[in-house]
Structures are given as structure tokens and as C-alpha cells.
Image: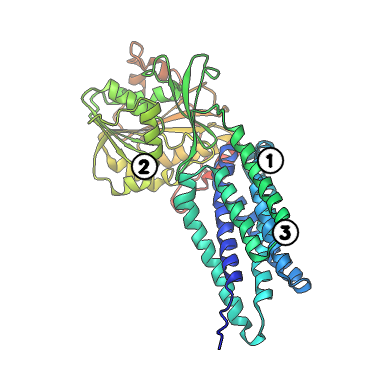
Amino acid sequence: MKIKIPSLKLEIVVFICGATVMILELLGSRILAPYLGTSIYIWASLIGVILGALSFGYFLGGRIADLKPQYSYLGAIILAAGVYIGLIPLFEGLILGASVSLGMKWGGIISAFCLFVVPSVLLGMVSPYALRLKIENLKKSGNTSGTLYALSTLGSIFGTFLAGFWLIPHFQLENILFGVSVVLIFSAVFTHSFKNKLFAGFLLLVIFANGVAILEKSNPKYLVEKDSAYNHIRILDSKVFLGRPARYLFLDIGFHSAMYLDKPEELVFGYTKYYRLGDYFNPNIQKALMIGGGGYSVPKDFLTRHQNAKIDVVEIDPEITRLASQYFNLNLEDSRLKIFHEDGRTFLNRNQEKYDVIYNDAFSSLYTVPYQLTTKEAIQEMASALSDQGILIVNVISAMSGEKGEFFRAEYKTLKSVFPQILVFPVEIKDQKTVQNIMIVALKNNNFDLSEMTDSISSTEFADYFKNLENNLIIPPQTPILTDNYSPVEYLIGKVL
């Protein structure tokens, strides 16, 4: 007697399509990042758009499956999804470039819609269609539907870990899209044997799209362009921005660090020089902490200026540190430099060291401010990590007054709730309405007399910094103190933009 072995064709296809949905969603965050950042608005746009598309796909797939319950139609749906995903590299730049002018919120929604609605709808159609084809006995329909949807969910879990832990950190985005596209096209053929010419035509079209995307980057203007586990990283040499040759580090959408190529030891960005104010308030700094390494401009400057001092740097992304050593003259062998690759907040939570000064430059990316470092609880941890004469210096990008100054005022009030004395230095221009780098100096010791300070610095290197000292701040009483329980940073940054 011949035993009939049940076909697992539909189960395999449902698993693959479930994995593809989550791979596409995680890829979406990286595709949008260079243009729109990775804020909560971008994630909300991606998740909302893809969930909406999947819902419509479930509905549409069920309707079509009842009308045309044929393997050829299911195969065509999967084939269409695969081809569309393979063609994304051809038009993503045009869509994202146009979306930038709409801002983070609408730009994120529109770009997510244009890029990912079609494949998400098609992939959403797969599970109900497969269910209709699989059900042969109504008495077993519950078991069959439960099995298929469980496999789809398991596929999504698999796709999440595959993309997050392996694909994105190791491969270019275009190559991942190409790989996903090819897998879906072969899955379509596995579902239904299409004519060879039709299959070959679609496969060649996807190969062509990937080839065009690679060709566009075959002569890259960037020394490095890659995705790490945390950032979309680009390194560029140019003399356009400053009129002299310099090397720039871009993280996601904007400048993060820079280094002059003709004089690497000189600080490029004006705001980084204001971190030297720590030496005015404490001329005998022995140990410092830097939160946010980037190109390591400030740590390198600190080690040059303090031959007998040490500095700890917390940089969440080890790939940035590796690239800084390769492209930005970071000496990893310096015994006075200790680097921790973790989130700044988790480091502060477990820290037992005492520092004379803490430099916080985790706010240099305007689109993606790490809210967990803006709150009162985080500031309290920083204060606890300081010595009795300790200083905290924070970089904030904002205006000081008006609607565009709401983030600055909230952060100022939060700092003021922990530190007894706060000084504010707008970097570019002494104007409260201008969005710019604003350096906030928080003093743990309240013994400094402001009038004495300003009278005693005229002959020092700090004189130019104190010219920008802002003495006329008005903080409305309704300004919130940011806490772990309430920190609407993206909303406030949205007003800055």
C-alpha cells in the first residue's frame, strides 16, 4: 500500500512570505534613514503603513481566493511581490528625495506608502489565499488555519532576527532587496510552474534593477557608505563645506564629526571648542567622560590638551569606533583612553567612577535625539557620576525662544532641577530665535560668581566663548521637566524642524 505524504508547499511559502514582511519593515527603517532619520515618527510611519497594507491584503486575498482558488493565482501574487521589491532600488531615491521637503511626519508616511504598500498588500494576500487552497475538509478548517497563521508568524519572527542580527549588519541594502526578491520569485515558481520565458523575463528585470543600483554606486563620492547595527554611516572627503579639505562623518541624515585633512588636530565645528570650558571651571581635570564618540574629535582634543588625564568614552556603535581609528586618526592604543560600546544611559546606570567633567554630545543628530539621556533621571545619574567640583557640558540643537525653543527650554529646566547653576552659550550667534548648537554648562558647585567670572577671563582663551554667554533667558512656568515617564522629545524636535 502506497502511503500518501502530504505536500508542505503552502506551509513553506507562507513561512517565507511571513519572514519577508518583517525583513522589509526593518529594511525600510534603513532605507528612510539617510533622508528622514530614524525617529519614532519614522517607525510609526513604517509600522502603521505596513500593518494597514497587510490588513487590506488579508481582505483582498480572501475575496480573490474564493473567486479563483488556483495555485497559479497565488504564484502570480508572490511573483508580483518579488518583482516589486527587486525594483525598489530603481525609484527609492526619487521618492525619498521628494519626501524630504514634507518633513519627518508626512515625509515618513508618504515615502513608506509609496515604497512598501504594494509588496505588503501582496504579501498579506498570501496567507488567506493559501488557507483557501489548503482547506479540503471543513471539520479540519480550524486546525489548518491555525497552522498556517502560526507558520506565518514564525516566519515573521525568523525574518526579524535574520534581518536585525545578520542581513543588515553584513550586506548592502540593495543586495538584501535583491536577495529577498529572488527568493520570492523562486517561491512563486515553487508554488506554480510558470512558463520559463515569463520567469526568466521577471528575473532578468530584477537583476537589471540591482545592476543599475550597483552601477550608480560604483564610483561613490563616499569613502565609506554602510549600515551598522545602529547607524547608516557615510564618510566623505570634501572642501566644499568649509573651503579647505576636510573629512566628514555622516550618521543617518546629518553631519556628526569632521576632521581637517591639512591639520587633523584642529577642531572643525565651533561647538566642539566649547567643551574646553570645562578647563575654566576646573583647571585640574584628571578624569573625563564623553557620551557619544562619533569621530572622536573631542576625546582626541582632550588627550592632546591634558597630557596626564584620562578620558572614558561611551559610544554605542563599535563600527563607528573602528572607522574612527581607520579614517579619523583615533589611537586605540592610548592607555589614557577607555572606550565602552553601549548605550550612554545603561553605562550611567551601572557606573561607579567619579569624573571631573562629563561631555554629552549625544544630541548632535537633530532627527534622532536619544530621549533616555534627556530626562531628569538621566541627569541625576550624570550628577552622581561627577566629583564635588564636577561640570556637565551638554550640546543641544535648538532655538532658545519661541516654538522652536521648546526642546531647549525643557532640557534647561530639567538640568536646572538637578544642578544649582546653569550657564548657556549659543554657539553661532547670540540670538534666541536662531536654531543652532547651544552649549549648556551645568555646575555641581554653586560657588562660582558670574560677575567675577566674566571680569577675569578677558586675557584667557575662554574670552570668545563668554562673549556668547546668554544672561536673559525666560523659562515659562508651564515648561515641562522631562522624565522617564514623560519625554516627548520627537514632538519637541519636530517643532525645531
Say what amino acid the circle numbered 3 marks. Answer: Lys
Establish if 21 lies above or below 236: below
- Circle 2 SS class: loop
Say what amino acid the circle numbered 2 marks. Answer: Val
Residue 195: mark? 3
Image coords of residue 49 (percent x, y): 65, 54
Establish if 189 lies above or below 92: below
Disc 3 crowd rating (10 Å Cα; few below 14, some 14-19, many 20+) is few
Q: Could you give the CA–CA distance between mark 1 and mark 3, rounded to whole angstroms?
A: 33 Å
Residue 418: mark? 2
Label 1 belongs to which residue?
A: 95
Image coords of residue 135 (percent x, y): 66, 79
**In the visual, does 324 lie left or right of 437?**
left
Say what amino acid the circle numbered 1 marks. Answer: Ile
Q: For the N terminus, give its image quadrant.
A: bottom right
Point 47% across, 34% down: residue: 364
- Circle 1 SS class: helix
Q: Could you give the CA–CA distance between mark 1 and mark 2, rounded to whole angstroms?
A: 45 Å
Residue 395: mark? none
